Image: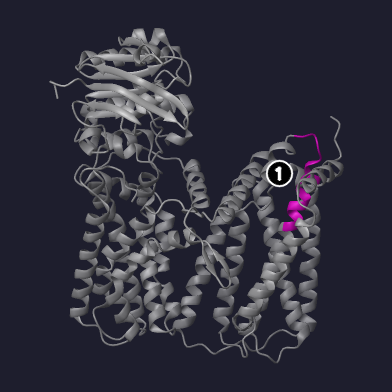
Amino acid sequence: MTVVPLAPVRRWISRTQSSHRERGATLSSLYVAALTVAIIGGILHRQLAEVFWPPAPDSSGLAGASLVAVCFGVLYLALRRFGPLALSRPAASWLLPAPVSRRRLLLPSLRLAAIAAAVIGALAALAIVGHVVPRVLAGAETALLTTAGALLGLALLLIATAAQAGGRWGDVVDTLAGLFLAAGLAGLVASTTLDEPVGVRGWPPVGTLAPIVGGGAVVVVVVLALVVRGLAATPSDRILEASRTAGTLFDAAFGIEPSFLTDMIERRYWARRKLRSTGLPSRLPVLVTQDLLLTVRRRRRLLWLALGTTLPVLLGSAPGWLLGAAVLLGCLTAGMTATGNVRTDAGNPVLLRLLSLSSRQAVLQRLWVPGVLAGLWAAVALTALDLLGDLPSGPWWALGLTLGPVGAAAAVHRARAGFVRNELLPLDTPMGTLSTGPLVNAVMGPDLLLLGLPAWIAIGQGDDLSWTTVLLQGVIGVGGARVYLSGTTSDDRTELSH
Amino acid sequence: MVDHPAVEVDDLYVGYGSTPVLVGVSLTVAPGEGVCVTGENGIGKSTLLRCVSGLQQPDQGTIRVFGGDPGATPEFWRAVVTTVEPPTWYPGLTAREHAELVCRAHGQDPEEAGVDEALERFGLGGHTDAIPPSLSSGQKQRLVLALALLRPSALLILDEPEQRLDREGRADVASLLTDYVAGGGSLLMASHDDSFAAASGAAITTMESLSADLP
């Protein structure tokens, strides 16, 4: 088969596309992008400096090692989720089936992913060095460590690329990366509770570091060459899947509609799972059993949720209001793990009509599982904070349980929010035009967390917790959830949307 | 319920923009009777079914379903099943579990209601553990019909139920619809396939015959 050279085709496409654009449109978008970066950098330069290079190292060696696991674990999982090799949707439709060199077709994507992975790896390494390594280190060592971060980012990209083309071992590596990330988070939590010395001592000198980083660089370059050689072997279906992800990501960003992306991830997850039908137990209300079944089928998500109960400990020394907000948001997240069905019903009421349940019956039944999850999550999280001495004495576990209805109402409200309403009037501010649709959509759900105000105040104030506060929170939580139910549903309609 | 016609449409007008789709449409479906509306694409069959299901408001005219307004109430949907709109399937629920969910929501025991037999009859016996989005379009259509016929109802409103079914599937569905009407149920459907409509025992009528003469 004759192979058509790709470069002239690409040149023709870009020439034709740019002829449809206004003159200077590309330049002006570049100008706007550079200006945006400059303005945001100008506003946030103090906070950025604090994140990447604080005045003095402020974290222990354990925290540093944990941050390595967290940053690079997240990088690997993100690379895997988005491809890492992807084409634009038009290229996937027209160029992938064309008789062009597959390697040349995929090279720009690999180049872009490599730059992104190296930059993110270098930035992560710089930040970790800034937080952990004593300032006596010379610039050469910092530069070497930052380079090592970039190389590690590249190495992860190469593994992810091989996994994209490879067989089932990719799933095993994903699981390992997940475990690595979990261990990192556990290490971070442990480092805040253990009284470890700040910074690390006895860092290897340049003489030792340079050969290690140099050797790593050689290995990465050799493997990169091998990956480029084998690029043509990447199966088309994997590239198509990644291209759809990239397209959906673009749609989600362009329409400020994150649900496009989450829905796609959800669909793919279930498409890969092999399920066995089980009988729904008849003792519980029918929709409660369905929510239970959905929750039990996502065991890994439950494990992450259980691990997440320790994350508020990271904010143990932060201001109380921030800790309180984190616990309430955790409640919302816990509740949202079981609201997939209510989201389906809110988006399309056809099945709810087939079930012939009123919106009140449906929402009441759908509140139970999120409520139990949110209550248990908050109880465990607050107990962990209590045991580690981040909270004054009191029945914090009971306060956590009373947050169940709050988390349930907020999670179900969030699931019923539906699409962003881009037809809402934009606000003119001195900083520019602000579209209200995404803002209104973003607060739907979190707004009901205000029902947890007594708990928020109790955590924020730092006084001993009394049973009166627990009772007050219980009454407000249950009462608020009831008012939400009666105010937004009805016995004589089936539709869930507001 | 028995005193009223299952469906009573009188002098219905619906237009999209300046294009009239339904002009003075009148139609009656008696209880225990099947009516099949035929006609070419774009003549307004689906619009008529959507209006009767209460999923679209007509510009003018009256629609009564069992003597009441078609609407969103749970009571209406306990009596009426429609396949005018495609469902969004629940995440992480297999085809059989969808069927079981529908039965349980109507207080039926899935075994007694014959979930497995229904899925088998619709050729889905080997796909009970599949999630519906992974089924082919024809299988999804069969699953929708299986769910619609499993649960108790008094009126079926079906939009081209023969669509995407193979020849055997059409014959099976037609005989099931005959049984449904023989059991006292009412049926209003739109179809392109006259022989399917005849096999399902429904009285065939054209959209033109239902409409008032255009001025």
Amino acid type at circle 1 is Thr
- Name the side, left or right, on which A28 lies relative to B59: right
- Label 1 residue SS: loop
- Does residue B115 belong to the magenta stretch? no
**Is any atom of residue A205 visible in this view?**
yes
- Does residue A109 belong to the magenta stretch? yes
Residue at 70% across, 72% down = A122
Residue at 49% across, 47% down = A269
Secondary structure mainly formed by the magenta segment: helix
**Is any atom of residue B124 visible in this view?**
no
- Which residues lie in the magenta part? A98-112
Residue at 38% across, 65% down = A446
- The image position of residue A278, as x and y in percent, is 32, 39
Give me the chain letter of mark 1: A
A468 in relation to A74, above or below: below
Image quadrant where one finds the N terminus of chain A: top right
Q: Quadrant of residue B153?
A: top left
The foreground one among A61 and A146 is A146
B85 in relation to A168, above or below: above
The colour scheme applied to this rendered structure is: one colour
Query: From this viewpoint, which residue is outermost toward the bottom?
Result: A136
Residue at 42% across, 67% down = A308
Residue topped by disc 1: A234
A150 in relation to B118, above or below: below
